Image (tube, rainbow, N blue to C red):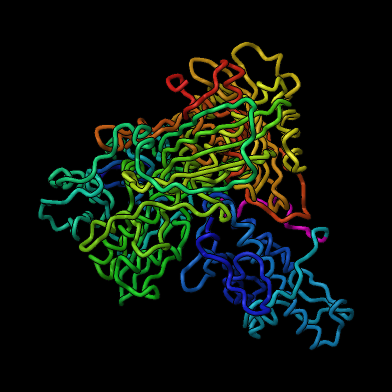
């Protein structure tokens, strides 16, 4: 078993599979499978605070480390500022890409609370949104950043 | 476009005239149910694809019933229970489903109020509804909740009750928040992909390397299920299924099969097809100056971010399937055909998936899951596609070529418009023909090849010929289409269908004609447009983008316009695109003006128009399915580039308010105009008129 901290609690994950497979087998709804080759961003999680694709990463890489999924950032009772901002901006259409994007934005804002446009877009570049919600997503992240700085 | 396949509504002798989908589903109980706790369940047959339709429908219902929106519950579409609204496509959901629901709710309200009036003696006109309670002159005289059990919804709609007049609406027309987004933003189980049933198994499929290839050898393995040439790896866990599938696939041997032509454009020009006349009026002019142009576009993929998924359970002679397909009843019809079951023994229940943008593999994976479930009776089976299947096994949007010949008369006015489109059919949806069209169907014993896809007639929205007819006045018009009768790549509907290429072709030729006439392209368009709603969106988009300052743009930049009325019967939309030529073309901003009649949820409409426009930017500048070595080479995002965050242009949307007019869909209206606007901006920036999509350096 792979021992790690999953969304703040100790967890034991089965080995011999990808981190994405292991997390979904735990009953988590995110991360999501999008391509299996680290090219779409749907499967990003925070691994030791860094936004990381989980679809091709062996679960063994999580041994002794902290893993945070979208669920670990916040929920209805205690939403993360990014989740509040995405709701305020109605930042999504189908919503399938959002889990990975919000996780990446959380990592970005922790490292850089006031990212300029170029670094914001560069951070999101691994993520595909096919519904065309890009501008709303960018607005939501700027809104959350402003709120988190205040 | 689904109307076209339904045929005309069977209106009885002197029967009521009912709006939208209510004509074919007139039983009120199919549409809504009142509960003693004061809530109401609505049961739409149109499904959520990420376009926000459920929110709009809940607003419509709450409006007509005078209920707070939070009292509206929405039941998932289930065959046998929900109204059959065919396919959620063609930007028709508010028109067909919304207007049906509006009438059904108005009629339900009228029935409840008339009972309250009779029971209380209060005059009907004196009763008002407050949060679901009926208030007469002397106080409360009933409520939806109190009368819920009285069977008042029995029987068919009669078309007698009138929905509220536009001025009385308080909820329809407001930007209520999306009902489905919170669950998606909090990571709750809302997608079909998150449906976890007890004892659920996991399936991954092994596909033939080419269409028509015959399986000659498959390894013996307890997890490998074979039925004819259909192969599925069925395992207890996802990880196990995904580990085994590539290993077992490598041990399979296939023979034969059809090669895909290496040069799709050369094939498109030479392939056999049926030619037909789309529209014609007037007589060809004598003289004038003729302009001939040819426009081409490649095969396009839907490219959903989530891969296709379905869950199926075969138990007690019933096949139950959970699917994110756009047409649950259509899917049921083809599943029943393939499985040899009566339709009643197949139940398709909708669950949300990732955005599909048209007919992707959602229907196909439902058959995959059903076949795997039949192999494991009593156990639910979840089938999920790989990214490679998503590109190479799902239906693609066909490559197309459009030839235009236009004549400008001595006065610089359009005298003749001829166009001819060559394409595969754009509709290969299930449930419409005798032969099932689902991917795995031909592989099964006795399976027949999937017939070439069709096109709806123009009156039903058309397919390859969608938007082939310009909105511009011309004394002579002749539009023809050739639908190819061979289909080496399975083709079906992608958001916009033929409109994507026709709107671009029309708007490009109009700009060239304007140049020949020595006139500003906006003024030239306006001179040929009689429709005031068309003129208004064009003027609005031009004003938003600063059209007057166009000549002052720096070298290498361009501002282009594009306009169309989607399907010639839907929303009017004009787009101005500001573009800069760098190493590649970069679209900097889009200004969108749209008249879509009554708008139920303005923020949702803007979201859809912007989304369609960004999808179109992606198609204009990035997308093409790569084909070679006799097969589809695009099997990964690496081989199918799309728009990314770094290149997303700024977008401004203006909705023209027309609450008195019928509502029209927003999901596709901005796409053709966006591609056209970009093409015209390219001309200003680089001095060339694009003739081939995508507008990459190689194609320019």
Q: Position of residue B450 (x, y in %)?
A: 32, 55
Q: Main secondary structure of the magenta part?
A: loop
Q: Relative to B693, is B177 on the left or the right? A: right
Which residue is at 76% across, 21% downward? B548
* Nearer to me, B419 or A109: B419
- From this view, report whether residue B579 is shown above or below residue B336: above
Q: Is residue B227 magenta?
A: no
Which residue is at 62% across, 19% downward? B558
- From this view, report whether residue B71 is shown above or below residue B144: above
- From this view, report whether residue B516 is shown above or below residue B247: above
* Nearer to me, B424 or B77: B424
- From this view, report whether residue B169 is shown above or below residue B665: below
Q: Position of residue B304 (x, y in %)?
A: 44, 43
Q: Position of residue B331 (x, y in %)?
A: 41, 62
- Most extreme residue toward the top is B555
- Most extreme residue toward the right is B137
Q: Position of residue B168 (x, y in %)?
A: 82, 61
In which image quadrant can residue B381 be found? bottom left
Which residue is at 70% across, 38% downward? B593
**Image quarter of the N terminus of chain B:** bottom right
Q: Is residue B180 magenta?
A: yes
Can residue B684 be seen? yes
Numbered disc total: 0
Q: Relative to A9, is B205 on the left or the right? A: left
Can residue B355 be seen? no
Q: Relative to B81, is B508 on the left or the right? A: right
Region in magenta: B168-182
Which residue is at 66% across, 70% downward? B18
């Amino acid at each position: 078993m792979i021992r790690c901290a999953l969304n703040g609690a100790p967890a034991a994950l089965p080995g011999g599979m990808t981190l994405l497979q292991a997390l979904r087998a735990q009953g988590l709804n995110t991360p999501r499978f999008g391509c299996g080759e680290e090219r779409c961003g749907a499967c990003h999680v925070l691994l030791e605070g860094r936004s990381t694709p989980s679809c091709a990463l062996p679960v063994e890489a999580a041994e002794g480390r902290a893993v945070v999924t979208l669920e670990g950032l916040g929920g209805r009772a205690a939403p993360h500022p990014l989740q509040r901002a995405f709701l305020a901006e109605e930042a999504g259409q189908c919503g399938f890409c959002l889990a990975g994007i919000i996780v990446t934005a959380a990592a970005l804002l922790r490292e850089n609370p006031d990212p300029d446009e170029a670094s914001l877009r560069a951070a999101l570049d691994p993520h595909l949104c096919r519904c065309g919600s890009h501008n709303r997503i960018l607005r939501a992240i700027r809104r959350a950043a402003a709120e988190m700085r205040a | 476009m689904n109307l076209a396949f339904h045929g005309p509504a069977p209106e009885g002798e002197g029967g009521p005239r009912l709006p939208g989908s209510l004509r074919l589903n007139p039983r009120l109980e199919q549409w809504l149910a009142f509960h003693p706790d004061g809530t109401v369940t609505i049961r739409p047959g149109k499904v959520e694809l990420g376009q926000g339709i459920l929110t709009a429908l809940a607003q419509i219902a709450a409006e007509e019933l005078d209920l707070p929106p939070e009292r509206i519950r929405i039941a998932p579409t289930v065959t046998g229970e929900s109204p059959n609204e065919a396919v959620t496509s063609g930007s028709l959901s508010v028109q067909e489903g919304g207007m049906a629901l509006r009438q059904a709710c108005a009629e339900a309200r009228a029935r409840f109020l008339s009972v309250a009036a009779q029971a209380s003696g209060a005059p009907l006109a004196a009763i008002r509804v407050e949060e679901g309670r009926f208030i007469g002159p002397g106080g409360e005289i009933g409520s939806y909740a109190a009368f819920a059990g009285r069977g008042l919804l029995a029987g068919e709609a009669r078309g007698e009750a009138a929905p509220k007049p536009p001025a009385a609406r308080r909820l329809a027309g407001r930007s209520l928040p999306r009902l489905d987004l919170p669950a998606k933003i909090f990571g709750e189980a809302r997608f079909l992909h998150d449906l976890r049933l007890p004892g659920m198994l996991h399936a991954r499929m092994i596909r033939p390397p080419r269409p028509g290839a015959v399986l000659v050898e498959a390894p013996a393995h307890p997890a490998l299920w074979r039925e004819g040439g259909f192969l599925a790896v069925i395992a207890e866990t996802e990880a196990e299924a995904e580990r085994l599938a590539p290993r077992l696939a490598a041990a399979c041997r296939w023979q034969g099969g059809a090669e895909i032509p290496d040069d799709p454009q050369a094939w498109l020009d030479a392939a056999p097809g049926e030619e037909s006349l789309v529209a014609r009026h007037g007589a060809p002019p004598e003289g004038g100056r003729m302009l001939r142009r040819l426009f081409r576009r490649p095969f396009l993929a839907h490219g959903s971010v989530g891969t296709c998924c379905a869950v199926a359970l075969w138990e007690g002679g019933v096949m139950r399937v959970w699917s994110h397909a756009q047409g649950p009843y259509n899917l049921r019809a083809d599943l029943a055909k393939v499985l040899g079951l009566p339709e009643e023994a197949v139940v398709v229940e909708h669950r949300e998936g990732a955005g599909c943008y048209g007919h992707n593999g959602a229907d196909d994976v439902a058959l995959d899951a059903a076949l795997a479930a039949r192999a494991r009776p009593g156990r639910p089976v979840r089938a999920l596609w790989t990214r490679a299947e998503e590109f190479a096994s799902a239906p693609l949007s066909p490559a197309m070529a459009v030839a235009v010949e236009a004549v400008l008369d001595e006065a610089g006015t359009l005298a003749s418009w001829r166009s001819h489109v060559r394409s595969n059919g754009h509709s290969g949806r299930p449930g419409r023909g005798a032969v099932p069209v689902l991917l795995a169907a031909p592989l099964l014993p006795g399976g027949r090849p999937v017939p070439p896809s069709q096109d709806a007639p123009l009156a039903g929205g058309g397919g390859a010929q969608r938007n082939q007819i310009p909105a511009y006045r011309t004394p002579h018009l002749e539009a023809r289409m050739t639908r190819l009768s061979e289909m080496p790549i399975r083709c079906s509907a992608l958001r916009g269908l033929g409109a994507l290429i026709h709107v671009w072709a029309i708007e490009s030729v109009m700009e060239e004609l304007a140049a020949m006439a020595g006139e500003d392209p906006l003024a030239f368009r306006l001179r040929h447009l009689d429709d005031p709603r068309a003129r208004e969106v064009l003027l609005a988009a031009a004003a938003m983008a600063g059209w007057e300052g166009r000549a002052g743009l720096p070298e290498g930049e361009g501002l282009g316009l594009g306009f169309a009325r989607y399907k010639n019967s839907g929303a009017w939309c004009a787009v101005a695109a500001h573009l800069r030529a760098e190493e590649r073309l970069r679209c900097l901003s889009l200004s969108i003006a749209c008249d879509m009649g009554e708008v139920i949820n303005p923020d949702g409409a803007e979201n859809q128009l912007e989304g369609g426009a960004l999808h179109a930017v992606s198609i204009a500048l990035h997308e093409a399915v790569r084909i070679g070595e006799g097969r589809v080479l695009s099997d990964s995002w690496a081989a199918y580039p799309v728009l990314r965050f770094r290149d997303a242009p700024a977008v401004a949307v203006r909705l023209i308010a027309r609450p008195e007019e019928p509502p029209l869909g927003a999901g596709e209206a901005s796409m053709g105009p966006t591609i056209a606007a970009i093409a015209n901006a390219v001309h200003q920036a680089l001095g060339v008129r694009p003739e081939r999509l995508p507008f990459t350096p190689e194609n320019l």
